[in-house]
């Protein structure tokens, strides 16, 4: 009997080392490296009038101070524009160190290298930078009014304007019996992984190789950028991703200035150099997200069926656009959610501000799109006096309507076509789980006790597993160990475990015998990265395909050795055997030995593969023409387009009108990401996503003052939730396979966070009886809204 | 007199002797050296992680004479002669996971693993003084540490499970 690993709650391979303090995070190695500190701008917008480093030179242990003037060649150019787009007419990227002007608080101005970080900070403190402050543009309002400009050569602070349209939304709205028009907004937050960024580099002068360890979501991206900027051959740059203490999007940006400066300093100085971000630096120099303002017009019929939707929105992209306009494109294209739209128009303007650059944070534009769509559906229900779940049901795409083609272009440049799903079943599931139909009585009973309860619901569709591709390499060693490598990186998702499960099934081995390496360019040089809930779909399928090749080869070799027909063989418990006759079998380890014809035996088992071990066929070379030595294979998976996962969240909250406090009493999630490889891990992803969704709805926002100072740049003031603030969600799963990939799977990494603000806004509105049109909402804000409502 | 007494310098080194996980270790460090840096960089016990360096996230929690402290808010020179437990001290001598560690693995109480050492030590201390904590007592004990991955759901489950495993291992006498 063969063990099935796919679908099982397999304990994680990663945990042994992480639980014993034996993990290897960025700062856990390189103890003898030089330390780095950066002088960062205290101004949101200023001209640099001079940099005086004289005082710093007296610090014992100082090794080097660098400013922009010191940077050679392409290192002095602006950093790469990672994702160009035809509509991004005014892209701007930063210099690795500021060149004459700073555009946000936290922008690096000078780099200090010293014997350790303490001394580097001592020296950094003594560097005097002269600034001539310029007017700061902070927030979408001032950016739109463009009284002042972030970049003098970018008119109106406009980086890009994009419009996509399905049908004729404006005509459809004009002809609709009901029309609503309103504004919705969401504020800024940030990924805030517990481990910040960090880079450690070593130049090996003997081998002429640069080895970089960086806490990134894309090691191949860093490698390509560094090789290109430094003019080094790709093979001379090795990028290794160690254990990474969370990413949530912000670590996909590359190269961050530090990712080119630290390797450059290591090469220039001929010393190991390491920089580890502190928490303040993370707040003011790792990327942010979410700040958007939206204007919505919707037309609908008497039944609540949407006839036309016209959305215009303004995206705060911060000081620079290294990641292009991916975020607002995702909002624009994921906003339609699970609903049938015949007429949808969306236009956005991406605006520069003197704040930290915005790039994807888990959810990546979807929480805003979901907030807009779901608040819109709630308003339709309110306007018509219809149950909010019923309005949703009437607009849902039916299970028989897939593939569902929106006639739009998705964030990967591919058509926006939903592959599969069963949205009505998800809706029924979440209604049951939260107790939607019985809630009226519950609310009434609570009201009788003077308590104000409300219920909310929010639906989303998430394009996951975007291309272009990932690859996998599977190698059965002669000791029976199965070594697997894929190029994308891990930040806690359990890739070592789920990829081992996939390979264990494909090869008929124990998952404990499968060893997975991710994010190491030495092991797998072609990869894209971990973002967009894509790792399981992309690398999972690539690894499965590679494992299938290995399996076929193992069976071919074993068939010869056993003198059996290949079709009669199976692999079970690591033994290739005649089906049903385990006595006629050969272990995979031995097949691996036979796959590699030897002159020199290295063990007793290996003697079987040597030249005199068995009489050869004199006419066939030891490695036949169309074969390769070794029991290994490499394969790639590249999808025609994304898969689309979906889900719905529902919450019951209690609002205290005297304090504005919100208590989440129940939180229900029904989620469909296709077949689950490891339900324990998927549930963990949902738990974490829900926590970030609740955080984004009730606690977390980045508070910039008008001068562009980030007023809450610490964990003291940025309210990341503790255990006491996060509800325990009840979770239900649907498993609608994707027709697009061999395993039928969809991504699950980001889903949990997407509908949090939409769902809680609906529930709070229902409980408090006040309009919630911007998130997050704090107790004082809610209290004020309740007071205004009572006063009118 | 003042010409013979040299003013103390921040770079002066001080001998610190600590017993970490039962092993006595020493290092010469400047007065401003944080305990977290002493453990991680001088003693090379990198299991203790630093998440904020201002005492809010709790990732750097270690046990000092059995009590949880934030090693990023503690100077190394303050713990001279003290007894410290770090995450490296929670497994058995043969590397076998202790009950708290096993519970976190079984219940998927960690994802990226960066905050985990702090939670493991808080749980160890909690169960040492309160073998059967209620959910409220678990929240009190762990409610000051941040995790960005798990939403805390499985951390709480892990603590409950750790209580079971601990009582199985050490039946009440």
Image (spheres, coloured by chain):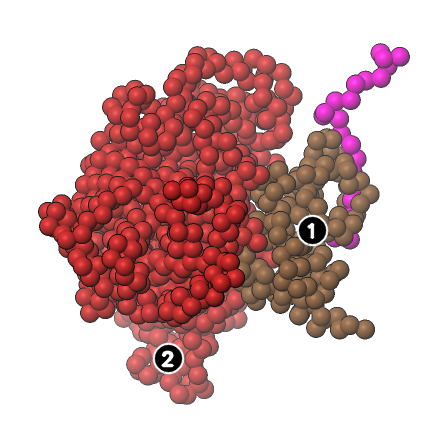
Question: Residue B86 bears which disc, if any?
Answer: 1
At x 40%, y 70%, the residue is A438
Q: Helix or strand or loop: what does disc 2 sit on?
A: strand
Chain seen in brown: B
Nearest the viewer among B163 and A566 is B163
Task: Work out which quarter of the rendered image holds the N terminus of chain A and state it.
Answer: bottom left
Q: Helix or strand or loop: what does disc 1 sit on?
A: loop
Residue A458's image quarter? bottom left
At x 48%, y 31%, the residue is A710
At x 35%, y 81%, the residue is A569
Q: Give x and y (percent) for residue A163.
A: 18, 41
| Looking at the image, residue A376 lies above or below residue A256 | below
Residue A101's image quarter? top left
1 or 2: mark nearer the eye: 1
Chain seen in red: A
Q: Using the image, name the chain to which the residue with label 1 belongs.
A: B
Q: Give x and y (percent) for residue A67.
A: 46, 20
Q: Which residues are magenta?
A: B1-23
Q: Give x and y (percent) for residue A762.
A: 37, 54
Question: Residue A762 bears which disc, if any?
Answer: none
Left or right: B54 as drawn, with respect to B29: left
Q: Determine which residue is flagged by label 2.
A: A570
Nearest the viewer among A64 and A391 is A391
């Amino acid at each position: 009997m063969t063990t099935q690993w796919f679908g099982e709650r397999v304990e994680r391979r990663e945990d042994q080392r992480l639980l014993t303090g034996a993990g290897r995070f960025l700062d856990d190695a390189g103890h003898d490296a030089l330390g780095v500190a950066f002088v960062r701008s205290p101004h949101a917008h200023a001209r640099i009038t001079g940099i005086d480093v004289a005082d710093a030179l007296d610090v014992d242990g100082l090794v080097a101070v660098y400013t922009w003037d010191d940077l050679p060649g392409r290192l002095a150019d602006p950093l790469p524009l990672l994702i160009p787009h035809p509509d991004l007419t005014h892209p701007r990227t930063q210099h690795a160190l500021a060149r004459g002007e700073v555009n946000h608080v936290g922008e690096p101005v000078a780099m200090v290298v010293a014997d350790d970080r303490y001394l580097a900070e001592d020296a950094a403190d003594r560097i005097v930078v002269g600034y001539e402050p310029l007017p700061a543009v902070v927030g979408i309002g001032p950016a739109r009014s463009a009284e002042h400009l972030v970049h003098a050569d970018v008119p109106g602070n406009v980086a890009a304007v994009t419009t996509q349209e399905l049908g004729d939304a404006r005509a459809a709205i004009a002809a609709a019996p009901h029309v609503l028009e309103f504004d919705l907004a969401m504020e800024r937050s940030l990924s805030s992984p517990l481990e910040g960024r960090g880079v450690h580099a070593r130049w090996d002068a003997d081998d002429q190789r640069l080895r970089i360890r960086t806490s990134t979501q894309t090691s191949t991206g860093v490698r390509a950028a560094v090789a290109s900027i430094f003019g080094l051959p790709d093979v001379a740059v090795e990028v290794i991703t160690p254990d990474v203490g969370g990413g949530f999007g912000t670590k996909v940006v590359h190269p961050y200035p530090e990712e080119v400066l630290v390797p450059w300093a290591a090469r220039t100085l001929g010393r190991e150099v390491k920089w580890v971000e502190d928490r303040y630096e993370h707040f003011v120099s790792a990327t942010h997200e979410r700040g958007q303002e939206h204007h919505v017009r919707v037309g609908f019929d008497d039944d609540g069926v949407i006839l036309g939707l016209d959305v215009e929105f303004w995206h705060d992209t911060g000081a620079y656009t290294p990641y292009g306009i991916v975020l607002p494109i995702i909002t624009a294209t994921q906003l339609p959610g699970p609903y049938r739209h015949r007429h949808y128009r969306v236009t956005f303007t991406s605006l520069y501000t003197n704040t930290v650059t915005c790039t994807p944070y888990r959810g990546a534009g979807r929480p805003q799109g979901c907030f807009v769509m779901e608040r819109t559906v709630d308003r339709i229900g309110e306007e018509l006096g219809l149950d909010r779940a019923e309005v949703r049901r009437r607009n849902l795409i039916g299970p028989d309507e897939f593939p569902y083609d929106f006639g739009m272009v998705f964030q990967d440049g591919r058509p926006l076509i939903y592959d599969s799903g069963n949205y009505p079943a998800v809706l029924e599931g979440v209604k049951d789980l939260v107790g939607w139909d019985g809630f009226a009585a519950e609310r009434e009973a609570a009201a009788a006790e003077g308590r104000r309860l409300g219920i909310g619901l929010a639906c989303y569709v998430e394009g996951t597993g975007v291309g272009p591709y990932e690859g996998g390499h599977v190698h059965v060693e002669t000791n029976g160990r199965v070594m697997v490598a894929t190029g994308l990186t891990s930040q806690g998702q359990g890739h070592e475990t789920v990829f081992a499960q996939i390979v264990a099934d494909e090869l008929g081995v124990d998952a404990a015998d499968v060893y997975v390496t991710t994010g190491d360019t030495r092991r797998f040089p072609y990869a894209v990265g971990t973002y967009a809930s894509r790792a399981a779909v992309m690398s999972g399928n690539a690894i499965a395909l590679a494992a299938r090749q290995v399996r076929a080869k193992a069976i071919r070799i074993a068939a010869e050795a056993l003198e059996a027909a290949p079709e009669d063989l199976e692999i079970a418990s690591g033994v290739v055997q005649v089906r049903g006759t385990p006595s006629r079998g050969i272990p995979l380890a031995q097949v691996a030995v036979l796959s590699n014809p030897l002159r020199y035996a290295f063990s007793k088992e290996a003697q079987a593969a040597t030249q005199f071990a068995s009489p050869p066929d004199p006419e066939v070379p030891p490695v036949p023409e169309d074969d390769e030595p070794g029991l290994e294979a490499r394969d790639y998976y590249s999808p025609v387009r994304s898969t689309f996962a979906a889900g719905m969240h529902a919450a019951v909250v209690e609002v205290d009108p005297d304090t504005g406090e919100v208590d989440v009493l129940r939180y229900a999630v029904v989620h469909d990401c296709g077949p689950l490889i490891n339900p324990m891990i998927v549930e963990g992803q949902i738990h974490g996503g829900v926590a970030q969704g609740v955080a984004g709805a009730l606690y977390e926002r980045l508070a910039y003052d008008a001068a562009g100072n980030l007023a809450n740049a610490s964990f003291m003031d940025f309210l990341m939730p503790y255990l006491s603030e996060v509800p325990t969600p009840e979770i239900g799963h649907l498993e609608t396979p994707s027709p697009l990939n061999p395993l039928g799977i969809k991504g699950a990494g980001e889903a949990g966070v997407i509908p949090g603000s939409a769902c809680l806004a609906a529930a709070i509105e229902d409980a408090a009886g006040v309009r919630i049109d911007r998130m997050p909402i704090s107790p004082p804000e809610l209290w004020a809204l309740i007071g205004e409502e009572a006063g009118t | 007199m003042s010409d013979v007494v040299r003013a103390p310098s921040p770079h002066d080194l001080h001998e610190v002797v600590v017993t970490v996980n039962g092993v006595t270790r020493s290092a010469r460090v400047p007065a401003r050296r944080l305990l977290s840096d002493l453990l991680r960089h001088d003693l090379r016990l990198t299991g203790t992680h630093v998440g904020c360096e201002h005492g809010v996230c709790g990732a750097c929690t270690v046990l000092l004479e059995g009590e949880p402290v934030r090693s990023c808010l503690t100077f190394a020179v303050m713990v001279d002669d003290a007894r410290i437990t770090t995450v490296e001290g929670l497994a058995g001598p043969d590397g076998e996971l202790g009950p708290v560690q096993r519970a976190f693995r079984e219940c998927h109480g960690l994802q990226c693993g960066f905050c985990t050492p702090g939670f493991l030590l808080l749980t160890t201390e909690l169960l040492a003084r309160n073998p059967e904590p209620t959910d409220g007592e678990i929240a009190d004990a762990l409610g000051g540490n941040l995790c960005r991955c798990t939403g805390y759901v499985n951390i709480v489950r892990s603590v409950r499970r750790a209580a079971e495993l601990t009582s199985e291992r050490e039946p009440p006498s």
